[in-house]
Image: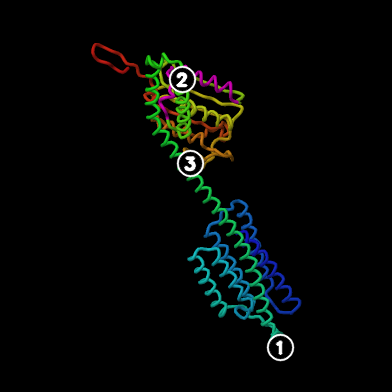
Amino acid sequence: MLRLIQLRWLAVIGQISTIIIAKFVLHIHLPTPDMLTIIACLIAFNIGSTLRWQESVTVTNGELFFALFVDVIMLTGQLYLSGGTNNPFIFLYLLQVIISAMLLESWSTWFIIAITSVCIAGLSEFYVPVEFPYGDEGIYNLYVQGLIICFVLDAALLTFFINRISANLRAGEAQLADLRQRAAEEDHIVRMGLLASGAAHELGTPLATLSVILGDWQHMPQFTSNEELRQEIDVMQAQLFRCKNIISDILLSTGEVRGDSSAKTTLNTFLNTLAEEWGNTRPANSFVFENHIGEDIPVVFDSSLKQMIYNVLDNAAEASPAWVKLQASYEVDILTLVVTDIGPGFLPEMLTQFGKPYQSSKDRPGRGLGLFFAVNVARKLGGKVDVSNYKNKDGNVGGASVQMTLPLSAIHLKTSVNEGNKQYDV
């Protein structure tokens, strides 16, 4: 569209110059007021096209078709007022046809061809007669000179236009190739992550077996009486514990929950400790924690769940360093955690694509993975994460809200009670 606007300004300059030369140099009588009116309409249309371009850089095929259609109609009007098909500049229609073939969809190009054909046929019958001083034959003939000028104009403008369009196409192809390369790299990373996650799951069973065996060895007399063997068992246990931590970190990065890293506590203790730790170590100037949970319920919290809440709070603090709020409530076996801030809120495209990786306004590696991790962990525990923007008193976006809901059954601590010969889980 920008190239068409530039080409249209050149057409305006060319038409004004041609009218001046024809009228004052060649002394050809032309309906100048009517021709200048068409040029004024072309200028007005080009100004409107420029304003439209500045509003949005996305242009549809229909808009391009309409722009070329207007150019054809304007050219037809000028040719109608200056001799119709007797005017050597009739071949400027080829410029419109070739440009449409480059820019438009196939059906649109055929429409332009049909329109220009009808216009040429009509100009052969309907036009304002103009007396041309043809002069001598050959190169000195005015009609031949007009044909040569028309050919030079067509060739020059097409060369200019095609070079610019080709540069745009090459830039687009280079960008598309870069995006494909990035997609291939990200797909490779995802495959590596899946492989690592699968390997971590597979290693869990043999490591647990080794942990049980080493625990039995620690209590066997033949090992406890031998100081050297006991020290070696301690080293083996330390290395085994390190392997477990590595596997836990791998599963944590993919949103998996691993029971080995769970800790027994109570709901209020966990939330109060988490809020205190986060508030003391994070940059939010004002951190508000509201705990509306009255009953202190025994629960088991995994480190991944703690990291999930940290990620949401960290994102809120980055968007709103001045104020972050965490609100906890419990109702009908559902734990609800709501994090709010007073930042710019989520972009519309982020709200529609929420839960997918790399959806973030932060332009750096790892962007969007925090919320992706939170959604994944909540989903695996049977819960969900909802995001929204809330309005302030003026009706504008006043900040973002992230609500995490988890079924209490996923984290509730079960204890065994013996009654007679039967054992019950409470």
What amino acid is at disc 3? Answer: Gln
Dot 2 falls on a residue whose secondary structure is helix
Q: Is residue 270 above or below residue 2?
A: above
Q: Is residue 156 left or right of residue 233?
A: right
In magenta segment, residue 142: no
Residue named by callout 1: 136
Q: Position of residue 182 (x, y in %)?
A: 53, 48
Q: Residue furthest top?
A: 420
Disc with the residue nearer the chain's start (2 vs 3) = 2
Residue named by callout 3: 353
Label 2 Cα neighbours within 10 Å, binned few <14 / some 14-19 / many ≥20: some
Q: Is residue 404 left or right of residue 5?
A: left
Q: Is residue 215 above or below residue 189?
A: above
Residue named by callout 2: 234
Q: Residue furthest left?
A: 421
Dot 3 falls on a residue whose secondary structure is loop
Dot 1 falls on a residue whose secondary structure is loop
Q: On residue 369, which mark appears?
A: none
Label 3 Cα neighbours within 10 Å, binned few <14 / some 14-19 / many ≥20: few
Q: Is residue 326 left or right of residue 146?
A: left
Gap between marks 2 and 1, in whole Å?
112 Å
Q: Position of residue 286 (x, y in %)?
A: 60, 23
Picture residue at 51% right of the left edge, 24% below the top: 326
Disc with the residue nearer the chain's start (2 vs 1) = 1
Discs 3/1, front? 3
Label 1 Cα neighbours within 10 Å, binned few <14 / some 14-19 / many ≥20: few
User: 143 and 194: which one is in front?
Assistant: 194
In the image, which residues are magenta?
Answer: 257-282
Q: Position of residue 224 (x, y in %)?
A: 41, 14
In magenta segment, residue 277: yes
